[in-house]
Amino acid sequence: MTDRSRLSLAGAAARAGTLAGTALLVATFGTPPAVGAPTHYPFPAPGTTGTTGAPAPRAAAGGGEVFFGVPELPHAGTSAAAPTGASTAAPVAAGTPAAAAGAPAAVGSAPVAATAATAIPDGMPNGRGSYEDLVALWTEFLEWTDPERARGLNPKNDVAGLTTDVYPDYGTAAVEQRRERMRALQARLADMGVARWTRSQQVDWLAVRAKFDEHDFTLSVSRPWSRDPGFYADQMLRITFTTLPVRGDALREVRRRLQAIPKLVEQAERNLTEGAADLADLALHNLTSQDGVNHGFPYREVPPAGVVGWYADLLARVEKQQPELRRDVLAAKRAVEQYRDWLVEKRPTMTAQAGVGAELFDWYVKHVKLMPYTSEQMLTLGTRELQRLWALYAIEQHRNRRLPPLELSKSAEEYRARIAATDAHVREYLRAEEIVTIPPFIRQLSMNVPWIVRKSGPNFWEQIQYRDPSPDHVHAVIPGHSFDDIVERANTHPIRGKISDGVRVEGWGVYLEEAMLHAGMFAHSPRINELIYLFGIFRAVRVNADIWLQTNRMKVDEVVKYWMNWTPYLDRDVARVDAEIYLRRPPGYGLGYMIGMIQMQQLLADVKHQQGDAFVLRDFHDRFLAVGRLPMSLVRYEMTGLDDEVQPLWKREPMPVRR
C-alpha cells in the first residue's frame, strides 16, 4: 500500500458527508419509515418533487405496504397537475437539459406535458389511461409472465435467461393464445395519457413498453420452444442437483418435477419444428458433455458428462440415500436418454440459422434495449474499444515491467484470505474516497468464482481471480452486481423495483472496473491494472461477436477462435460457454457489457458538464442507483433531462417478420 493510500484510509472516519450519503440510500432503499413519517433526500429520488427533494405522496400498496418513489397518480383521462414544488416550465427542446445550464436536473420533477408552445412528440400516446392504470397493467403482465418477480423474488433462470422450474405447454395453439393476450396488453398500453405525465412517469411507460416488446419478441421471433433443443435440455437439468434426502412438501415437489420429464420430452419432439443447426449442436454437447466451467454446479471431483451424466449421478445418490425415488429417477433418466437419441437422429434436418438477422437485431436493440446505436455503429465502437484496451494493456505492462508478477493462489485457504483482504480494502476505499454510499444493510456479499482444482489448470476467470480478486470484486461483488442486487431488491417502487435491464446491470459493473483503476483503488498493486485491462479486452471482443452471431455472420466455433486469438488466458471452455449464452439469449446481451460501459461514461460526462464544480462523484453514483435498473437511455433522460436519445423511441416501428 502506498503512503497516499494509507493516509486516505486512515482519514476515512473524518470524511464529511458520508453519513448524509448513507441517509440517502437508507431513505430510498432501506426499511420504510412509518406511514406519514417525513423522509428527505439529498437530491430528488424517482417520484419526488421539486429541487428540494421532498418526497412525493406515497401510495399504499395492497396489504398496507408503503413504497417509495411512486410518481403522483393522476386519474384516467385527466391531465396530471404539477406536483407541489415542481417546476411548471414548458419542456425544453430535444437534446438540451431540463435544468438551467450548470445546475443539476431535478429527477422527475417537472411535468413534460405538451403546452401551446410545444408539440407532443411523434408517437407519444395521449390516450385515456392514467399512471395508476400503467402500474396495474404492469402488475398484471408480471403476474402472467414472471410470477416470482411479481412477488419480489428472483427467478431461477437457465443459460438462455428463461425460467427453468416449470414445464408449461408450448404447443402451437398455446403460444398463439399467449400472442393474442400480448397484443391485448399492448393495445391497453398504447391508450395511456403519457403526454400529460411527468418525466419520471413517461420513463416508466417506456420501460414497461420495452418489457412488453421483449416478451412479444420471444413469442414471435426467438421461439426457443420450436427452434432451440437446449430450451428443453435446460429444464431437465436442475432437478438433478437436489440434495438428498427430501421429505414432506419438498419430496412431493421433486416427484412432480421428475414425473414431468417424460412429458417435457414429448413436447420437445412435437414442438421442435424449426431447429437451428448451431443450437442443436450446443444442446447435444450439453446433454452429453460437461461444459468445462461448472460454475453453478454442485462440485464433483469428476464432473458428470452433461445432463445425461447428471441423471446417472442422481440415480446413484438416490439408490444410496433415498431408494423410494428410484423409479421416478429411472423413468426421467430414460426419457432424457430418449431425447438425446431423438436429437441425434433429427440433427441433419435442423438447418435453420440461429441468429435473428440484422433487421430484427436492430429493431430489438432499439425497441427493447432502448439503445441509441445500430449494429454497424456498435461494431465500430467495439473495435475501437478493443484497440484502446490492447494499447493500454501494452503500456501498463511496460510500466510494471520491473515489478514481480502476480502469482496464482496455491490453495483454497490462500484464495479465501485474498478475497477477505480485497473485500476489506475495497469497502474502506469506497468510504474513504467517497466513491459511493454503502448502506448499513450491506453486509457479506456473494462472489462469482469458486475455488476449483482442474487437471487442465485454471480457466480464464480463475487465471484472473486467483491472481488477484480485485477486478471481479468491484464488478461482481461491491459496488457491482451483488451490491447492486441488494440495493435494488430493497426498491419497493411498483415498476422500477421489478425491472432489471441487462445493459444497465453489466454496464455498471464494467464501468466500475476501469473507473476504480483511475480513481486509484489499485495504486498499492499496479499489476492489478493489467488484469483490469484483460477483463476489458474480453468485454470488448464480445461486442462484435454478439452482433456476428445474431446476424448470422459467424458460428459459435468461429467466435471461439476469434475470442481466443484476441484475449490472453482465454480457454476454449469459457469461450464456448459465453458464446452459447450470447447466441441463445435475446440479442444484445453480450455487447451490453461494453456498450453499457460507454453509456455509463456518457452519463457521467453529461452530469459533470451540467453540474460543473458542484459535481460530487459519490452523489452521482448514489443518484444513479436510486433511479433503478432501467435502460441507460432512460436513466440518462431522468438524471439529465437530455432527451435526444428518448425522442426517437416514442414512435414504435412494427416488428419485422423473421425470414
Image: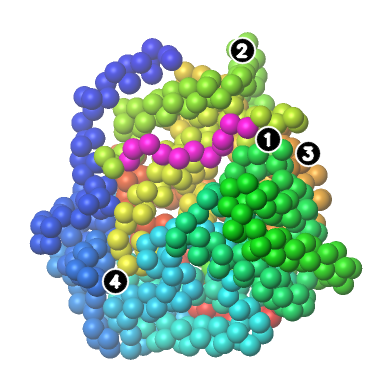
Query: To which residue does mark 3 refer?
Result: 565
Assign a secondary structure to mark 3: helix
Query: To which residue does mark 4 refer?
Result: 198
Image coordinates of residue 343 in percent, x first then y, are 81, 66
Query: Gap between marks 1 and 3, in whole Å?
Result: 30 Å
> Camera-side residue: 476 or 537?
476
Q: Assess whether residue 449 is covered by the magenta stretch.
A: yes
Image coordinates of residue 154 in percent, x first then y, are 44, 58
Query: To which residue does mark 1 refer?
Result: 301
Assign a secondary structure to mark 4: loop
Say whether disc 1 or disc 4 marks the residue closer to the N-terminus: 4
Q: Residue at x 55, y 83 (%)?
A: 178
Q: Residue at x 71, y 51 (%)?
A: 312
Give the label on residue 404, or none: 2
Say whether disc 2 or disc 3 marks the residue closer to the N-terminus: 2
Instruction: Say if mark 1 contacts mark 3, CB within 8 Å.
Output: no
Say whether disc 3 or disc 4 marks the residue closer to the N-terminus: 4
Query: Gap between marks 3 and 4, in whole Å?
Result: 50 Å
Give the label on residue 259, or none: none
* Viewer-nearest of discs 4 and 2: 2
